[in-house]
């Protein structure tokens, strides 16, 4: 189907009368490469092996009629776009209309005049060539757009990796935390994508953007002083106030990047939502804005649970990690207080998956820890 051809175009002549096949072949050669078939069955067999540029098809034949052959042609992807010209002695308008409805491009009435045949065949082949050229251009453009889109996605992923790696140099836990929360986000989004409250927010494209931008939710911590970020113990009230600035720092850094680009980028929009909103709480007691309920972006509501669950189950210098059951019970207790109740229900349903993600990365950390290979 389609594609620009080199050399003579190929025309298939299908007619059950040998004399007509010979006459038509003589008319079309040497301008075209001509194939012939004595009936519909022979034509269908030939068309399984080769696709011509145009088909001249007798209507009234023993076995499969021309109408049946045309219907078969239009059902096959390989021959759907091949122009079909019917050859017929039928002059009823209804017969001609039926053939055109089946997908034929023209009718030539027998006996065939050489000038009419040559003009009609050449005209339809030129039209097909123009269509094929346009299709090839569209295919090229689609592939080019796809390639450039993939390049842009890879560039975004490299930027995310660079930023999270930079954060990792300042906080030993950030890298694993970012990867775990990325998996938690995917699980929650997939669980909620058909929920009546979330279906318009979580289409497939948005879910992928959520997952890819999730590692940036804590990027603002790069702007927090080392003595606070890396403190091996609980923060004082004053230190906690400084730490609470990281959502705004992350949002502002991402906003500056978007301003430099000069265009609205869905990926950065979601990343800003995550960075700025993941410490907001359902009852309005969170920070930095104190927004509540559905005012909190869906992305931030999902990240709130992913972030807190990971904080509870992760070991810190000042605490041991909670077992899954205890962390899950805490989140369930805070449903409607800290967290969107429907997101909590999704989390509860995904308990085994959250636990498996945590165990996977715990195993990965143990394999790559200093001395693990000794």
Image: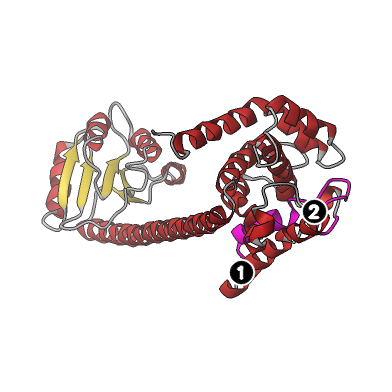
Residue at coordinates 64% horizontally, 53% vertically from top-left?
Answer: 230
Q: How many marks?
A: 2
The tag on residue 236 is: 2
Identify the magenta region.
263-290
Residue annotated with mark 1: 258
Disc 1 versus disc 2: distance between alpha carbons? 34 Å
* Residue 86 position in % (x across, y down): 32, 45
- Please say whether residue 208 is visible from this viewpoint: no
Q: Does label 1 or label 2 sit earlier along the sequence?
A: 2
* Residue 272 position in % (x across, y down): 67, 59
Left or right, 360 with reference to 248: left
Residues tagged 1 and 2 counted as in contact (Cβ below 8 A): no
Q: Is residue 270 magenta?
A: yes
- Please say whether residue 313 is visible from this viewpoint: yes
Q: Quadrant of residue 115?
A: bottom left
Looking at the rendering, in which quadrant would you find the C terminus?
top left
Secondary structure of the residue carrying numbered label 1: helix
Circle 2 Cα neighbour tier, 10 Å, few/some/many (<14 / 14–19 / ≥20) = few
Tell me: residue 97, above or below residue 322: below
């Amino acid at each position: 189907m389609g594609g620009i051809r080199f050399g003579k175009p190929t025309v298939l002549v299908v007619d059950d009368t040998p004399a007509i096949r010979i006459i038509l072949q003589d008319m079309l050669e040497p301008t075209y490469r001509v194939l012939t078939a004595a009936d519909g069955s022979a034509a269908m067999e030939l068309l399984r092996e080769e696709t011509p540029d145009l088909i001249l098809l007798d209507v009234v034949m023993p076995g499969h009629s021309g109408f049946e052959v045309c219907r078969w042609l239009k059902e096959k992807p390989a021959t759907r776009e091949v122009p079909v010209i019917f050859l017929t002695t039928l002059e009823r308008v209804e017969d001609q209309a039926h053939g055109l409805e089946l997908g034929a491009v023209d009718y030539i009435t027998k006996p065939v005049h050489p000038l009419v045949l040559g003009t009609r065949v050449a005209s339809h082949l030129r039209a097909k060539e123009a269509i094929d050229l346009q299709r090839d251009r569209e295919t090229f453009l689609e592939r080019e757009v796809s390639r450039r889109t993939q390049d842009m996605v890879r560039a975004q992923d490299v930027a995310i990796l660079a930023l999270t790696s930079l954060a990792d140099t300042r906080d030993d836990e950030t890298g694993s935390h970012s990867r775990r929360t990325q998996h938690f986000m995917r699980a929650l989004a997939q669980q909620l994508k058909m929920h009546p409250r979330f279906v318009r927010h979580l289409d497939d494209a948005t879910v992928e953007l959520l997952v890819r931008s999730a590692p940036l939710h804590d990027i603002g911590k790069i702007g927090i002083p080392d003595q606070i970020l890396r403190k091996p113990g609980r923060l004082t009230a004053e230190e906690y106030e400084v730490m609470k600035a990281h959502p705004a720092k992350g949002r502002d850094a991402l906003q500056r990047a978007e301003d430099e680009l000069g265009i609205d980028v869905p990926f950065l929009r979601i990343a800003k939502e995550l960075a700025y909103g993941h410490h907001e709480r359902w009852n309005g007691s969170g920070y930095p804005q104190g927004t509540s309920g559905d005012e909190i972006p869906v992305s931030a509501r999902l990240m709130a649970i992913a972030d807190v669950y990971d904080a509870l189950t992760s070991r810190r210098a000042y605490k041991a990690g909670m077992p899954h059951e205890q962390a899950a019970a805490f989140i369930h207790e805070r449903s409607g207080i800290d967290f969107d109740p429907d997101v909590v229900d999704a989390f509860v349903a995904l308990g085994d998956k959250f636990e498996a993600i945590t165990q996977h990365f715990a195993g990965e950390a143990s394999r790559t820890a200093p001395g693990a290979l000794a």
